[in-house]
Amino acid sequence: MLKAFPLKLELRGAPSQTMTYLSPLLAIVLTMILGALLFLLLGKDPVAALKVFLIDPFSGKRAISELLLKSVPLILCALGLTVCFRASIWNIGAEGQFTVGALCAGAMLVWLDVPGHGISGTVGLILMICAGVLGGAFWASITALLRDRFNANEILVSLMLTYVAQLLLMYAVNGPLKDPNGMNFPQSKVFSDEFMLPMLIAGTRLHVGFVVTIVAALIMTVFVTRSLRGFSLTVGGVAPHAARYAGFSSRNALWMSLLISGGFAGLAGAFEIAGPIGQLLPSVSPGYGFAAIIVAFIGRLHPIGAVFGGLIMSLLYLGGELAQSRLGLPSAITGVFQGMLLFLLLACDTLIDYRLRWKQQA
Amino acid sequence: MTATPARLEIAHIRKAYPGVLANDDINLRVTPGEIHAVLGENGAGKSTLMKIIFGTVKPDAGEIRWNGEVVHISNPHVARKLGIAMVFQHFSLFDTLTVAENIALGLQADTDLQELTARIRQTGEKYGLELEPNRHVHTLSVGERQRVEIVRALLTNPQLLILDEPTSVLTPQAVEKLFITLRKLAAEGCSILYISHKLDEIRALCHSATVMRGGRVTGNCDPRNETSAGLSRMMIGDELVRLRRERNHEIHRNELKLHINRLCLPKAHLFATELKDIECEVRAGEIVGIAGVSGNGQQELLAALSGEDQRAAPNMIVLGGAAVGHLAPNPRRARGLGLVPEERLGRGAVPSLSLAANMLLSHQKDPYVKRGMIDFAYTRRVAASIIERFKVKASGPDALAKSLSGGNLQKFIVGREMERKPSVFIVAQPTWGVDVGAAAQIHAEILALKQEGCAVLVISEELDELFALCDRLHVIAKGQLSPSIQIEQATREQVGLWMSGLWHDTAAGTVATEAGHA
């Protein structure tokens, strides 16, 4: 079987720079081709379905603003994960850090947003954002502490803490943070407009958080590519012994990358509840924290790449929603596309170190 | 052509990599029971040729005959089935597995570990390669890891054994022992391909030699009839430079730069070596050597000196008058320490980063880093100047560390540490796996550093190197350091004996001389 296959993989002399950047594009194209095939099997016209998936999210100002809006939590989470993954700290609990960030920010708003409290909207927003960032960072710090003190595996701990976080949120909206006038629905009150993030474009839901996200991506770019601290994280990630020789502390790297990552995820959570959601609900994220893992890798663990990766993932989310409403496909379609994309990306990354060759007929 | 077919005969082998012709029309013939040397500098194409024979690399052209039959060795499994075993220069061992488990990986799937453990002990004893089969590989020193590789190869009862630079980490006595093993194997009919650049060893051991340079065969000879100089000419096209050592008998008056003051360190992990009462002084303008078989505490001592291990009491390590035993690597660098670690890839340099970026491992102050931001332009310029000054063969400061040969990377790392203008320079295994030309250059640089008044500590397992470089010599064995001996009074036999930890009987006289100096 294998012998008959006309192509073979051949090790390159050096990793291909071109393929490093081409691989995500190739993965996207292949995802679309496989997606079209999937639509065909589901009895849909693949061209029309792909149009719904890929083109319709760009139709008009409102649609594009939604695309950008949805990219904010994805990019923010991915920025933090980029730092972690560069340091080989496998934090896959951004979803949980996002949730705790949202919970803390929401609690802050519930506490502040009381008539006659006399807190201005700006101060309130700043306090809310701080609460979100600190909440996310705190949640990540549990992972850091357990790894630091007991050498507990950060993959398992951060993942399991995600479920703890979700239950915590569930408890909060069913208990202390429940809206007393909410007909016993498990949700907080709807926050007043003054405590909502200002809109960027009138008539859309796109808020200033998008600008913050872009600025954050630029700052993180400088951090990971130019600063000694960013460099030390990379060294610790790829060659721990060299990092020790250099004097870069692995404990610092662990704490710094997890706190940054948790902080960004918490910020994303705060932006969500003070932005498109506007209150605390039992579920505040359709898996942004997990999707951000894919975003970080599509973005080649580079902050600017994370911006593009976030936009692509946002497109998949919106395309998936449109596919549900217009084509009558199940909601799982978004997850299927995310999975295909990650899988194909990992497969295409093989081509960074290997090239495809036609087998010589001996 | 002889009547009996050669064990191995390769003809017109050619292998090109992107940008380099690693093997160009190589012919080689090994008869049963022959110890055949393949001699050449790093980068001459020896390793590629061996990988082709072992099936890990596929040649572009050429023919391999095994006992007269044309064979296609498409992978190492085929090679092993034919009866070819190889001991690689770069070990292919899994750190997290034990010695026995690692060896089992290369054998049949149904190998019984218990029985294998016994066989490992047996083979180890028979050939003087003592190993504890249940130890984890990550706790082994370089020398011990090599023993694992050799034992692994011998367990397959090979007809052809390929050894790539096998003696670089052995004591003279152990080399002798290994040679006895190899001669015994050869007498039993096993052919041996012995890759090395150590001319004396090849002359002592091998029956024939193929000399390679730049991917081509440049000569065939019987090394027993050649002088080292003659072999060297064939290998590098030049004769070796003799080191000239200036002796200064007033060294003991010089400033004390490094004082290891009764350093004691308990084991950091189960299989580490405990350091006991290490006492060593290095003065300005002096080169002090530490000999010893790897695994006797060198790793631990080096980690304590570099600051990677900060458990020592402050005054156990005194650097330029300051107690630094508890300090991290960077504060020690600030006090004038330059250090070249034993492992180049992964400790001394990050394989996947450029040479320029690797500068930053030990240069993290202005002007390399300003207010936390890296000045890449400046860093590249310094890296480029090191590449030029030390004649490092690399495409430039942007070349990835892993793209360099061992010798060239070592030259770069030594250059990087010398760039610090250190007042104390510590170097471990300066020329391990490094070709003759690069080794001579590194030695010359170390001597030049001494002339400039630097205090140099060389930790090495190569006695030739220590005898060529050092003013005084210590021996480390079982975590203890012998008293020092002036190099003029040292003999290989005595040092070899000390390597087994037996200096208490013989050292009395030497210690007295030492005391006289102080």
Image (spheres, coloured by chain):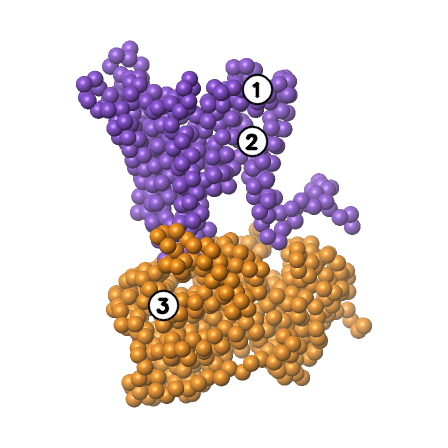
* Amino acid of disc 2: Met
Q: Residue at x 73, y 56 (%)?
A: B60
Colour chosen for chain B = orange
Q: Considering the numbered disc 3 on the image, is that residue within a helix, a strand or a loop? A: strand
Task: Name the residue beneath numbered marker 1.
Answer: A52
Q: Quadrant of the N terminus of chain A?
A: top right
Residue A254, image x, y percentages: 36, 46
Q: Earlier in the sequence, mark 1 or mark 2?
A: 1
Task: Name the residue beneath numbered marker 3.
Answer: B337
Q: Residue at x 63, y 84 (%)?
A: B227
Above-or-below relation of B95 to B509: above
- Could you tell whether A351 is left or right of B494 in the image? right
* Spatial CA span between label 3 and label 2: 52 Å
Asked if badge 1 and badge 2 are on a common chain, one would say: yes
The quadrant in which residue A223 appears is: top left
Observer-nearest residue: B243 or B516? Answer: B243
Q: Considering the numbered disc 2 on the image, is that residue within a helix, a strand or a loop? A: helix
Is residue B369 visible in this depiction of the protein?
yes
